[in-house]
Image (cartoon, rainbow, N blue to C red):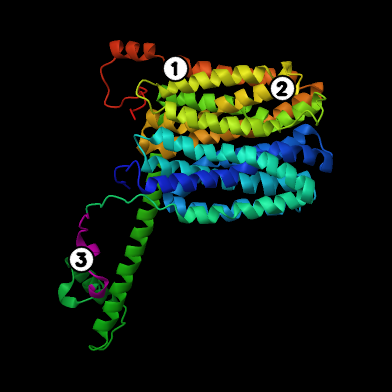
Amino acid sequence: MTYQKPPDGGWGWVIVLASFFIQFLCYGSPLAVGVLYVEWLEVFDEGKGKTAWVGSLAAGVGLLASPLCSASVSSFGARPVTIFSSFLVAGGLILSSFAPNVYFLYFSYGIMVGFGCGLLYTATVTVTCQYFEKRRGLALGIVSTGSSVGTFIYASLQKELIFVYGLDGCLLIIGALALNILACGILMRPLPQLPEVAVEKPGLENVPDAYLIYHEKDQKKEENIGMLEKEKSLEANGNCCSQENYPQMTQCDIMKDNSNSKENHNCKQLVKNKCRTYLDYWEDTINLFKNKVFAALFINILLFDIGGFPPSFLLEDVAKSANIDKEDMVVPLVFILGIMMAIGKLVLGILADFKWMNSLYLYVFTLIATGLAVSAVPFAKTYGTLAIIAGTIGFFTGNWSIFPYVTTNTVGLEKLTHAYGILMFFAGIGNCLGPPMVGWFFDWTQSYDIAFYFCGICVILGALGLLLVALPFWKNCKAKKLEPSTKSYAYNVAPAV
């Protein structure tokens, strides 16, 4: 399947706007789930680690299912997947309002909403990359900003809805809002495909169905031999027929034999094609991991999500555990984190488009800054300090806008969907493990200090590993020892605006 050259504009801006609102509507509640998390702790009276699974599943399931999401978008297209996912997300949120216990939330909020968000994220990123090339960083920055804007708006909205309508009413209302994803999905017109050269099929495949009937004069040599053998066998068995009935019987027998052989051939060919497809998929996957930068990316994204995701999920409870008065918390910490994340995504996306900017090194810098900010959480004892840390974490975790950009420059646009699905799978593992691990640390030590030190170290280790692999030193050493290869896995600097 070959698409035309990205237009870098035109209907692409409609795609960007629709994708922005899709991420706004689907990710608003899951990323601001910290507000709901505090309420669920009181309603169901479970441990922090057990309750944290609800939000971690919502963030992780969609990423774990990224290979399936990528296959769905590749097979059915972004528009049908978006329309289906709108009902999945809305249905999960509405069902969550009737949850009798935290285990029901694992399915309704964690799995249903999480899987729907994963489908929508893959669809929006894929179709945006198809429509943009020179301005891809800006376009992805605008699209990914939607989830951040949704985070800080839903943080305040959910808090107000809980105060007015209660927890159940809040979930019903935001579930109804999620149905607007359907309207946005209708606008996601796929990029036209280039016309493929028709290849003539030899033999019977070229003949219209109306002419695929038996004629004695048009028989092949093998069919004539088959008729003679049948005639001899019939005579030997004494099954003789009248002259007028015999040709009709042999004609039906031959047509039946040809039909059976054709069906068997088609089944064998189908099985063979499916096996070849799966073998090609795993061969392409192995080739991707031969790229050192890609291999480092998947380790990095796992560590980043283990350490970088919990702060956005648990900051509200961190403030509560630090005995900070509710009156001092003028603005929810999730609100601050969300609005700074929106700014970070837009700014970092624009920076990635400049010719002099290496987007990979920019991404590594944001990781190190995030790790240091997360490690500083235990030192924050006032609302003002926590607000500054939340803003810093939010801005630098806006690097999600340049992560697809880095992936595209590493593996190429034609392998983006495949590679991104693999990377998001490992990101999902990190999202699922991060918040429960922090919750277990608290249940064990009755403090968040050790947990956030651990999170910060994970993020920094992932960043340093990626930086070490991407250094030009390795490329120069390889160039001295080996001849130039037909396949290059060197990381390319971002294209100019």
- Magenta part of the protein: which range? 198-211
Residue type at mark 1: give it: Val
Image quadrant assignment for residue 353: top left
Packing grade of label 2 (10 A; few <14, some 14-19, many >=20) is few
**What percent of the width, then of the height, locates residue 171?**
71, 50
Residue type at mark 2: give it: Gly
Do we see residue 347 in this rendering? yes
Do we see residue 436 in this rendering? no
Residue 469, disc: 1
Q: Is residue 55 left or right of residue 484?
A: right
In depth, the one of 413 and 173 nearer the eye is 173
Residue type at mark 3: give it: Glu
Where does the C terminus fall, quadrant-wise? top left
Foreground label between 2 and 3? 2
The residue at which mark 3 appears reads as 222
**What percent of the width, then of the height, locates residue 310?**
67, 29
Please check the rendered image and state whether residue 484 is part of the magenta-colored stretch, yes or no: no
